[in-house]
Image (cartoon, helix red, strand yellow):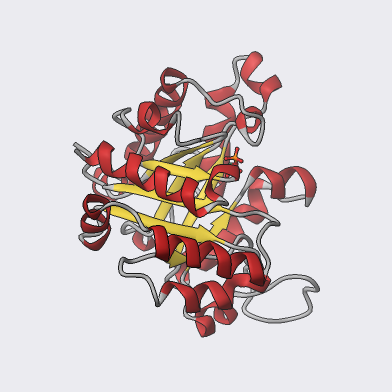
Amino acid sequence: VKSRGVLIAGNWKMNHGLVETREFFRLLRETGPSLDAIEKLRSARLRAWAFPPMTSLQVAEAEIQNLVFPFRIGAQNVHWEKSGAFTGEISGPMLTELGLGRALTGHSERRQYFGETNETVRKRTESLLKQDFQVILCVGETKAEREAGKTFAIVEEQLRVALGIVETSVSPIAEYLDGRLIIAYEPVWAIGTGLTATPAQAEEAHAMIRDFLTKRLGPAVAAKTPVLYGGSVTPENADALLACENIDGALVGGASLKAKGFISLLEAGARALG
Ligand code: PGA
């Protein structure tokens, strides 16, 4: 039983400008998922989200209005301030104006290439949650960290700082977390490499994350907080991953770019719901 349903989220990264975004949704509309998946999407047990690049957000938001099932759009990166001298950034209110209420924080590519730290991830996450956004907070260890046996320590530290948890306290933002926070466990060595974590490796990390959330956010909030797996998820390996008890969905890069692949992932999500 998937008490939190199944969420399939596509992270398009720096792919799909206006033309490709329109084409994706045209194909999604024309091909469409199965009636079973559509029914599960309509009942919100199955959820479909995509994170296009900034310049495609508005057209994506317009395109989803033409689908016969719910589909939600979010942004890949949002600043914690509402406006100001922050060249290259966009703010929560700017997205709200477009009708968007979702965002990613802490993606490993932001951490690796753009100087994102646990502290800036905390600022973005907290600000967005306070602005009523749904946030997918990404965490995960590098290959070297895993090989050094530090996976749990690294992921716990990322979660602890991002959620503002000091020492043994519970999170000061727990009151904002009623189902709007989503964690994505994305081992860095699995992202874009084709080296998917095995279902056993993923499940082990997810169980640890769930345990952490229960202790630090309280059982009621934790029970509403989905934990997604990300890192080389494909239509071929999605069933085995989604069958794991503590995996509530997938954050997918490469395999989410084509409508056909996205639909196959939604079908896997529908199967996991039984
Ligand atoms: P990938 O990316 O599916 O292409 O490995 C996952 C992610 O970065 O969210």
| Image quadrant in which the C terminus is located | top left
Q: In the rendered image, is residue 176 in sight?
A: yes
Q: Residue at x 40, y 77 (%)?
A: 65
Q: Residue furthest front?
A: 30
Residue 121 drawn at (x, y percent): 62, 53
Residue 41: image location, x then y, percent: 27, 58
- How many marks the image carries: the answer is 0
Q: Tell me residue 94's x, y (percent).
A: 59, 81
Task: Find residue 160 and report its horizontal and vertical position in percent.
Answer: 52, 42
- Which residue in the rendered view is the most extreme toward the bottom? 97
Report the residue at 45% width, 30% height from top: 236
* Image point (61%, 60%), residue name: 76
Q: What residue appears at the point 49 percent right and 67 percent down from the top-left corner?
A: 26
**Left of 224 or right of it: where is 192?**
right
Q: Is residue 151 above or below residue 40?
A: above
* Left or right side of 48 for 121: right
Which corner quadrant of the image does residue 211 belong to?
Answer: top left
Which image quarter holds the N terminus?
Answer: top left
Using the rendered image of the protein, determine whether residue 174 is visible from the camera's viewpoint: no
> Which picture quadrant has residue 150?
top right
Ligand 1 shows up in which quadrant of the image?
top right
Closest to the observer, 206 or 100: 100
The vertical placement of 42 against 197, above or below, is below
Position of 172 with respect to 178 (left or right) is: right
Which of 243 and 90 lies nearest the eye of the viewer?
Answer: 243
Is 136 or 130 nearer to us in this picture? Answer: 136
